[in-house]
Amino acid sequence: MNTRINARAVILLFADIAFVIFGFVLAAVIRLGFSEGVAWFGEDLASVKIVFALIASIGSLYLFDLYDFSVISSRRELIVRLIQSIGTTWLFLAVIYFFFPLFLVGRGIAALSAPIILMFLLASRMAIHFYLGHPDFGERVILVGSGPALDELNYATMSRRDLGYRIVGYVSGEKLNGNRPHSPLEYMGRLDELEEVIANERISRVVVGVSDRRGKFPLDMLLKLRLSGGLAIEESTTYLERVTGKVHLDSLLPSWLIFSARPRETRVMQAFRDISQRLLALVGLIASLPLALLTAVAVKLDSPGPVFYKQVRVGKNGKHFVLVKFRSMRTDAERDGAVWASVSDDRTTRVGRVIRKLRLDEIPQFWNIIKGDMSFVGPRPERPEFVAKLAESVPFYEYRHLVAPGLTGWAQVNYPYGASIEESKRKLEFDLYYIKNQSISLDLVILFETIKTILSGRGSR
């Protein structure tokens, strides 16, 4: 998933809006004739009906990851996802039309618009898919350095080809030998040949390995090229952060975090964020009350024990608080001490497996947000027993407590549940990215991705 608002995705969104509207226009003209078809759009509620169908269509495209081309590996998959998306849209609209016929577009127009819209969406995405996969398009990137970090840079770039970067090779003091875990990089020359390689290969971006900034390094050459304005130069850590949406701990230097951290948030913005999140949590708590009551009854009937499960967690600045959830495990689940949850955990009750899958067990955490213990978005709060262990083994781990923990987070929508030190380390990379780039726009992206994750059933244990 891209980490910032992708210009391609925005252009594609507006193109989709135009295609959907035009699909209805064309369907109305075919069904009713030109003059009557155009006149139909002037009727009462016609625009409201189209907007409603438009929102359903765009939401379905988003749900099936059709704004993220990194998950689409072939044209066949693209076609299948588009058909699934259009089918889901019209199934949803059929249900809405049954209960609210006021929004009905018209069976003839609806039947004609579906294949028309599918054709336009398929054509636009196939064109973009061709563009993104073509070797001659996109920024041409050269890597400077040596070691396994080059493979990581190359693999991350290939995995996110929708960003438009093309790594042509690397320059280094020596040619690298041995087995390559991913697609091999081409050796383009020595460090003193960098300027010639940049000119011959039409390079537009140079990515420098953090470990290669010292020692024998063409600093004067890069400075001249950078000041000329025709070349982008950046560290591998910054490049990887933008491409992968996480901060790579293995190549992270404290100085990079210090000098590239996000701007200081004003007290007014902090107060606005705090008040708005508490009000939103209150609305969420009231709106989810019927589901909460049903969940509470199901938990009570399924197994002996309390309805709620309370557990001490570590919050902002290391402060402990009591997190509240609907109980999803047996009462004796931790008779031998704190244990990470695992896939198909046999301690989970029958109802517990369902409410975890649907995230219903987390409804009581709206109360934690109202109290100020948590936010909607942030690193997931961990237990003190695990924090102590992880802080000893994982560098920078305690920095995740610089912000309030969240009901959902960047790590939750990008990485499965962490049940080991190594997995917690990988999740910390996403948490540090969020802390460094925290913003309202990123929070909204995370909330939308959380809804998609819940609907798809991914990531729960």
Image (spheres, rainbow, N blue to C red):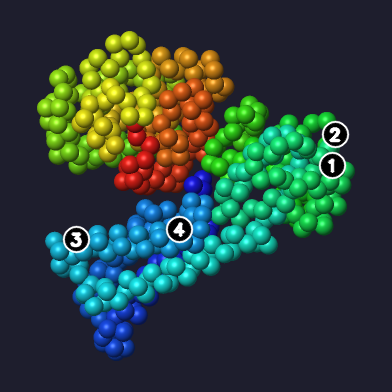
The residue to which callout 1 is attached is 191
Q: Which mark is residue 95?
A: 3
The local crowd at label 2, few if under 14, some if 14 to 19, many if 20 or more residues have their Cα within 10 Å, is: few
Q: Is residue 333 above or below residue 114?
A: above
x and y percent of residue 172 in the render? 81, 40
In the displayed orientation, state which residue is furthest to the top: 336
Task: Name which of mark 4 and mark 2 comes first in the sequence.
Answer: 4
Q: Give amino acid for label 4.
A: Glu
The local crowd at label 3, few if under 14, some if 14 to 19, many if 20 or more residues have their Cα within 10 Å, is: few
Q: Are marks 3 and 2 in contact (CB under 8 Å)?
A: no
Q: Is residue 19 above or below residue 406?
A: below
Instruction: Give the Cα distance between marks 1 and 2.
Output: 8 Å
The residue to which callout 2 is attached is 216
Element on which disc 3 rests = helix
Task: Name which of mark 1 and mark 3 comes first in the sequence.
Answer: 3
Q: Give amino acid for label 2.
A: Lys
Q: Residue at x 44, y 68 (%)?
A: 122
The residue to which callout 4 is attached is 77
Task: Name which of mark 3 and mark 4 comes first in the sequence.
Answer: 4
Camera-near label (4 vs 2) is 4
